[in-house]
Image (cartoon, grey):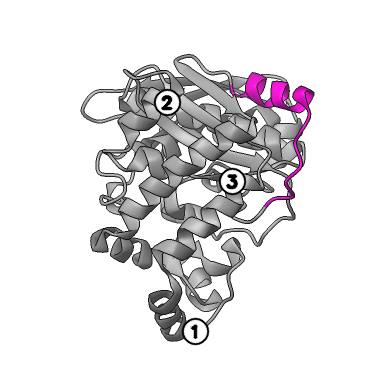
């Protein structure tokens, strides 16, 4: 269940170590870094937080109470100890295998205030704030930041090359590798790798991507922004734990979500976005749109044993 967690570009940048006392350590797998889009490993540590939250929820469903200790410093990791307790099966556990980043146009309908309350309540985490925008003008303003960030990334050949490395056009390659962004998971057609690569080069353009993101945001019910109290791995992990609970609660309610993180991934855009949020001294961590839409095919995962060390 932990390996089904949300993670940046489906890189699955985690390792799990089972210690002799029955605890589990979650460690970063630095061989799966995306250094162009994530030079300080922010997304990597957010991903570890997502995996930790899934592990805690799954343990509870199997009668294990989890005690989470996040180690910061030069070698950040997550130590989780367990003790017996009552089984706590519930909606978040059931949602783990169903949760996905649904990268498509949503139905454009708002969701209820009761549902927004449940999303915010489930995402509560020490050291993390969640700001939700449903007003159309606010969503349009966020869209402009996304377009600015996306345009900068699309103009960077190194970014485009690294993105291309993690794209999987054919089912055979997606299944063989068990990671990366399989085109079907974004609603795009599948093709043999050699054809998919040529289609990518021919049709993957800044204007087309910007138009897509405008449609995606306009069709969403709202946007959630996650902000940690500090910009360090400890708080990035906590942001991941907060987001994972948000995403699982959304899944339980039949609400889709997807990341639109360009304004926080581009260094020169990030301060502008923070000022617009009203937190000029902070580093916004995640931007997530949400709404209702049909499910897309699920992303692939590597075998669990490949992540155990």
**Between disc 1 and disc 3, whose residue precedes?**
1
Per the image, the residue denoted by label 3 is 217
Determine which of the numbered discs, if any, sits on residue 192 in the image: 1
Q: Which residues are magenta?
A: 106-123
Q: Quadrant of residue 151?
A: bottom left
Q: Which mark is residue 169?
A: none
Along the horizontal axis of the image, is 226 left or right of 89? left
Mark 2 neighbour density, 10 Å: few (under 14) some (14–19) many (20 or more): few
Please tell me whether mark 2 or mark 1 is closer to you in this view: 2
Is residue 104 placed above or below 235 in the rendered structure? below
Vertical arrangement, residue 194 with respect to residue 11, above or below: below
Mark 2 vs 1, N-terminal side? 1
Measuring 71% from the left and 21% from the top, which residue is drawn there? 117
> From the image, which quarter does the N terminus lie in?
top right
Which residue occupies the foreground of this view, 38 or 48? Answer: 38
The mark found on residue 276 in the picture is: 2
- Residue 273's spot in the image, x, y percent? 39, 31
**Residue at point 30%, 45% (across, down):** 38
Label 1 – label 3 distance at C-alpha:
31 Å
The numbered mark, 2 or 3, whose residue comes first in the sequence reads 3
Q: Is 242 one of the magenta-colored residues?
A: no
The image shows residue 280, relative to residue 1, as above or below, that is above
Q: x and y percent of residue 107 in the render?
A: 74, 50
Q: Position of residue 113 (x, y in %)?
A: 76, 24
Disc 1 crowd rating (10 Å Cα; few below 14, some 14-19, many 20+) is few
Q: Is residue 223 visible?
A: no
Foreground tag (1 vs 3): 3
Percent across and percent down for residue 191 are: 53, 81
Q: Is residue 116 magenta?
A: yes
User: Badge 3 local density, few (<14 within 10 Å), some, or many (20+)?
Assistant: many
């Amino acid at each position: 269940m932990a390996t089904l967690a949300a993670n940046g570009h489906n890189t699955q940048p985690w390792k799990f170590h089972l210690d002799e006392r029955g605890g589990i350590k979650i460690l970063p797998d630095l061989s799966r870094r995306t250094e162009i889009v994530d030079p300080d490993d922010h997304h990597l540590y957010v991903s570890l937080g997502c995996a930790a939250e899934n592990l805690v929820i799954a343990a509870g469903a199997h009668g294990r109470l989890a005690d989470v200790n996040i180690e910061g410093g030069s070698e950040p990791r997550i130590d989780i100890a367990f003790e017996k307790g009552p089984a706590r099966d519930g909606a978040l556990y059931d949602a783990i295998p169903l949760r996905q980043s649904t990268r498509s146009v949503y139905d454009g309908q708002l969701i209820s205030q009761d549902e927004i309350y449940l999303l915010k309540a489930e995402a509560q985490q020490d050291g993390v704030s969640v700001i939700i925008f449903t007003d159309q003008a606010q969503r349009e303003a966020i869209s402009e930041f996304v377009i600015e960030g996306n345009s900068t990334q699309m103009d960077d050949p190194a970014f485009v090359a690294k993105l291309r490395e993690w794209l999987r056009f054919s089912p055979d390659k997606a299944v063989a590798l068990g990671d990366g962004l399989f085109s079907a998971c974004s609603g795009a057609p599948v093709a043999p790798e050699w054809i998919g690569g040529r289609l990518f080069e021919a049709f993957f353009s800044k204007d087309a991507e910007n138009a897509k993101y405008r449609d995606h945001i306009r069709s969403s019910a709202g946007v959630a922004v996650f902000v940690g109290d500090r910009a360090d791995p400890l708080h990035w992990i906590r942001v991941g734990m907060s987001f994972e609970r948000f995403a699982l609660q959304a899944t339980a309610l039949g609400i889709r979500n997807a990341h639109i993180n360009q304004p926080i991934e581009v260094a020169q855009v990030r301060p502008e976005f923070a000022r617009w949020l009203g937190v000029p001294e902070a580093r916004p961590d995640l931007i997530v749109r949400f709404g209702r839409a049909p499910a897309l095919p699920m992303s692939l995962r590597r075998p669990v044993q490949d992540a155990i060390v």
